[in-house]
Image: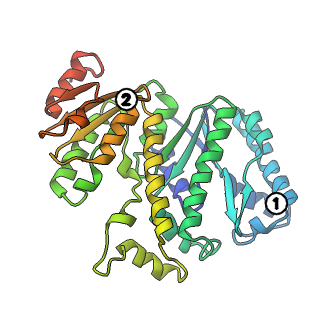
């Protein structure tokens, strides 16, 4: 099993993949992890032309291609000797206001990976990590980070589509078992969990209830949680002066940072598109709705799932609008009834 794993700088990708490798080892499976960036620095040292994270992307395109090719030639030989591996790389780089390719299609065709994954995190977390990196500090605005994340997903998805391989977007707040399951349990049912985030984000008890429901689902399914990467906090959590708390913190990190109306809209747009993408890569949509207030977001996700050939099962604990129920495959009054249904229909086994 070979996996190509992409993600922007600052996404936390490598640390997350190390957790994946450790979790797999705990489960009795050895996965070899190859990080292209580290291997390129090592190869440059061997060739007596060392470079640094601050300078490597300033190398000529031909030098970068040669260095990357030398690394992939070695990986091709290594992967013949190992059963399972993850290759951590980039799809593209956003450097000095232009887009750079970060892989050679020839070598991806030679590798013939079984699976493509793009690792993401919230724009706030990515910005903080980039600020701590000498190579990236002060280089990218919030808009640049949002754009690069979108490009990284798009480029990876296109490569996977070209090779007719599956592609998944995985947030680093997902359990490390997510990638393990995608690799070794491809037939495990994948669930998108929909719930009214903005109506409940400040309700500790209701959020605890949602997480308990999610964790019970994870005993049987692979669950994609939209709150594993949540950027809308930049738009709806505001300080006393009307400026978002996160925006104020980020402005301390970067003097030229300013969350404009256009950037705020881009955050919101990407949140919607990303959640739809998570629905696309899931088999079913499960709605958990512990409030009587109407959530436009959940309504849109129900309609999107239903009209894109997904079963939509919903737990409505309170009396809610019939518009929320209209596109649902089946509706349940509580979690216990829902899980009983899953047992009766053979979706999960009795415990």
Report x, y in % for residue 23.
Answer: 44, 43
Which label's residue is closer to the chain start, 1 or 2? 1
The residue that appears at 84% across and 66% down in the rendered structure is 49
Q: Which label belongs to residue 150?
A: none
Task: Give the Cα separation between the discs numbered 1 and 2.
Answer: 55 Å
Q: Are marks 1 and 2 in contact (CB under 8 Å)?
A: no
Whether residue 34 is visible, yes or no, is yes
Report x, y in % for residue 210.
Answer: 23, 45
Secondary structure beneath dot 1 equals: helix
Which quadrant is home to the N terminus?
top right
Which quadrant is home to the C terminus?
top left
At label 2, counting other C-alpha atoms closer than 10 Å, the crowd grade (few under 14, some 14-19, many 20 or more) is some
At label 1, counting other C-alpha atoms closer than 10 Å, the crowd grade (few under 14, some 14-19, many 20 or more) is few
Residue at image mark 1: 46
Secondary structure beneath dot 2 equals: helix
Q: Nearer the viewer, residue 288 or 318?
A: 318
Q: Is residue 345 above or below residue 323?
A: above
Q: Is residue 250 above or below residue 338?
A: below
Count of labels in the image: 2
The residue that appears at 33% across and 47% down in the rendered structure is 297
Disc nearest the viewer among 1 and 2 = 2
| Left or right, 294 with reference to 182 | left
| Left or right, 176 with reference to 54 | left
In the displayed image of the protein, which residue is found farthest to the top?
345
Whether residue 191 is visible, yes or no, is no
Q: Is residue 17 above or below residue 310?
A: below
Q: Is residue 327 above or below residue 146?
A: above
Report x, y in % for residue 340.
Answer: 18, 23
Q: Quadrant of residue 106?
A: top right
The residue that appears at 33% across and 77% down in the rendered structure is 242
| Left or right, 174 with reference to 320 | right
Residue at image mark 2: 306
């Amino acid at each position: 099993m070979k996996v190509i794993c992409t993600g922007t700088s600052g996404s936390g990708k490598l640390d997350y993949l190390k957790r994946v490798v450790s979790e797999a080892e705990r489960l009795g499976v050895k996965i070899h992890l190859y990080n292209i960036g580290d291997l390129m620095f090592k190869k440059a040292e061997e060739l007596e032309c060392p470079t640094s994270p601050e300078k490597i992307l300033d190398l000529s395109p031909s030098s970068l291609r040669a260095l990357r090719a030398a690394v992939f030639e070695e990986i091709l030989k290594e992967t013949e000797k190992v059963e399972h591996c993850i290759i951590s790389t980039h799809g593209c780089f956003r450097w000095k206001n232009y887009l750079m390719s970060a892989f050679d299609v020839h070598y991806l065709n030679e590798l013939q990976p079984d699976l493509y994954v793009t690792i993401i995190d919230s724009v706030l977390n990515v910005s903080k990590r980039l600020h701590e990196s000498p190579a990236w500090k002060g280089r990218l605005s919030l808009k640049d980070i949002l754009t690069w994340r979108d490009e990284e997903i798009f480029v990876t998805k296109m490569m996977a589509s070209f090779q007719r391989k599956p592609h998944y977007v995985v947030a680093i707040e997902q359990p490390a078992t997510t990638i393990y399951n995608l690799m070794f349990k491809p037939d495990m049912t994948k669930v998108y969990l929909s719930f009214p985030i903005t109506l409940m984000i400040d309700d500790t008890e209701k959020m605890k209830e949602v997480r308990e429901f999610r964790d019970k689902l994870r005993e049987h399914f692979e669950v994609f949680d939209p709150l594993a990467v949540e950027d809308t906090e930049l738009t709806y959590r505001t300080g006393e002066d009307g400026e978002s708390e996160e925006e104020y913190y980020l402005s301390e990190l970067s003097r030229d940072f300013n969350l404009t109306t256009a950037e705020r809209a881009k955050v919101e747009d990407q949140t919607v598109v990303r959640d739809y993408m998570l629905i696309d890569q899931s088999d079913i949509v499960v709605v958990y709705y512990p409030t009587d207030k109407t959530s436009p977001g959940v309504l849109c996700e129900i309609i999107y799932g239903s009209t894109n050939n997904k079963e939509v099962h919903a737990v409505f604990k309170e009396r809610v609008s019939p518009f929320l129920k209209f596109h649902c495959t089946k509706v349940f009054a509580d979690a216990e009834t829902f899980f009983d249904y899953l047992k009766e229909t053979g979706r999960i086994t009795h415990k």
